[in-house]
């Protein structure tokens, strides 16, 4: 089944995203339904969006669910067979949706398809280690995984192989997309990138810049925790510990150094890396939340 605008919804999870969300929404065709999951109780944000845009429905989570859980919430609100997951700091080109539709007519067996990042220096996909990168006639090509900021889901295909939530809700931030992609590939299904469908990812701009320190603290905690959990889930505890221990050691050295030179921001960053590793290693849930 190929995509149509009537059978496509877009889900965007937001949190303190008021600076970037409007540019994202305005880049999306007005005849496509947009569902926004705001990870707070910000009724003013919800009311503003739904007043400004006829194709937007905003749901408040009343708690910070994180990306994976927030996207699961949004997907359950959709009634279409295809769902495009976007981060709020993603901007579509005028032909992005049309090219995804064309790609879906060429490739009918995809579980996930992604547009391609316009920044060629930071590709939004990973290939298999033995796979050569060859684009033939700009035809959609198979990949190992794609970044989570733009993912088109074929729900009918995914529902046959993913019996639980699409995203593992144990991840709060980072690697929930890699986990989903690995489960899809392990099930012998396919992930594609549509090279004619392009998007611009601003990168790290999803949250208002005035919270940049708190965002950085959270990123460092969750990256370490999520990496340990991902490796433990798919490769075992020993592999997770062995891969993560060098980062724990260097983080400890840097924490001591920045404590001595009284750099509070850097000190907190490396303390959070240590905390993220230890909490993952003792099987504690991903509990850290930004303080703003």
Image (cartoon, rainbow, N blue to C red):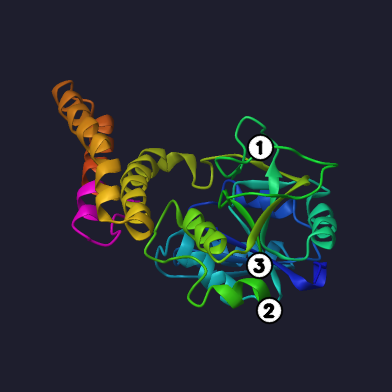
Q: Is residue 42 visible?
A: no
Q: Secondary structure at mark 3?
A: helix
Q: Label 1 vs label 2: CA separation?
A: 38 Å
Where residue 79 is drawn, which disc sits there? 2
Q: Which span is picked out in magenta?
A: 277-292
Give percent across and percent down for residue 177: 51, 56
Left or right: residue 261 versus residue 137 is left
Q: Is residue 289 magenta?
A: yes
For image coordinates 23% across by 30% down, the residue present is 250
Give percent across and percent down for residue 235: 35, 55
Quadrant position of residue 36: bottom right
> Which residue is disc 3 drawn over?
50
Q: Is residue 230 visible?
A: yes
Q: Nearer the N terminus, badge 2 or badge 3?
A: 3
Residue lying farthest top?
A: 261
Label 3 neighbour load within 10 Å: few <14, some 14-19, many 20+ = some
Quadrant position of residue 97: bottom right
For image coordinates 51% across by 61% down, the residue present is 180
Chief secondary structure of the magenta portion: loop
Q: Label 1 vs label 3: CA separation?
A: 45 Å
Left or right: residue 231 versus residue 52 is left
Where residue 132 is drawn, which disc sits there? 1
Where residue 74 is drawn, which disc sits there? none
Q: Nearer the viewer, mark 1 or mark 2?
A: 1
Give percent across and percent down for residue 93: 78, 45
């Amino acid at each position: 089944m190929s995509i149509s605008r009537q059978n496509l919804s877009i889900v965007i999870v937001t949190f303190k995203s008021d600076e970037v969300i409007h540019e994202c929404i305005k880049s999306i065709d007005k005849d496509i339904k947009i569902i926004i999951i705001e990870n707070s109780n910000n009724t003013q944000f919800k009311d503003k969006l739904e007043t400004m845009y006829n194709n937007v429905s905003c749901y408040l989570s009343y708690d910070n669910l994180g990306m994976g859980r927030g996207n699961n919430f949004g997907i359950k609100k959709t009634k279409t067979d295809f769902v495009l997951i976007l981060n709020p700091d993603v901007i579509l080109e005028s032909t992005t949706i049309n090219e995804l539709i064309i790609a879906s007519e060429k490739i009918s067996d995809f579980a996930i398809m992604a547009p391609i990042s316009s920044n060629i220096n930071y590709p939004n996909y990973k290939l298999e280690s033995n796979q050569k990168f060859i684009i033939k006639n700009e035809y959609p090509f198979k990949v190992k995984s794609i970044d989570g900021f733009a993912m088109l889901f074929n729900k009918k295909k995914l529902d046959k192989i993913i019996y639980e939530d699409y995203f593992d809700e144990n991840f709060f931030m980072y690697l929930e997309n890699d986990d989903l992609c690995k489960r899809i590939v392990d099930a012998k299904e396919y992930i594609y990138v549509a090279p004619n469908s392009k998007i611009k990812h601003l990168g790290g701009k999803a949250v208002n810049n005035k919270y940049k320190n708190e965002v950085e603290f959270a990123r460092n905690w969750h990256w370490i925790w999520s990496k340990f959990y991902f490796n433990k889930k798919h490769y075992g505890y020993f592999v997770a510990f062995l891969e993560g221990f060098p980062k724990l050691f260097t983080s400890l050295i840097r924490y001591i150094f920045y404590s001595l030179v009284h750099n509070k921001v850097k000190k907190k960053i490396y303390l959070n890396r240590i905390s993220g590793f230890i909490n993952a290693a003792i099987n504690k849930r991903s509990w850290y939340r930004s303080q703003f």
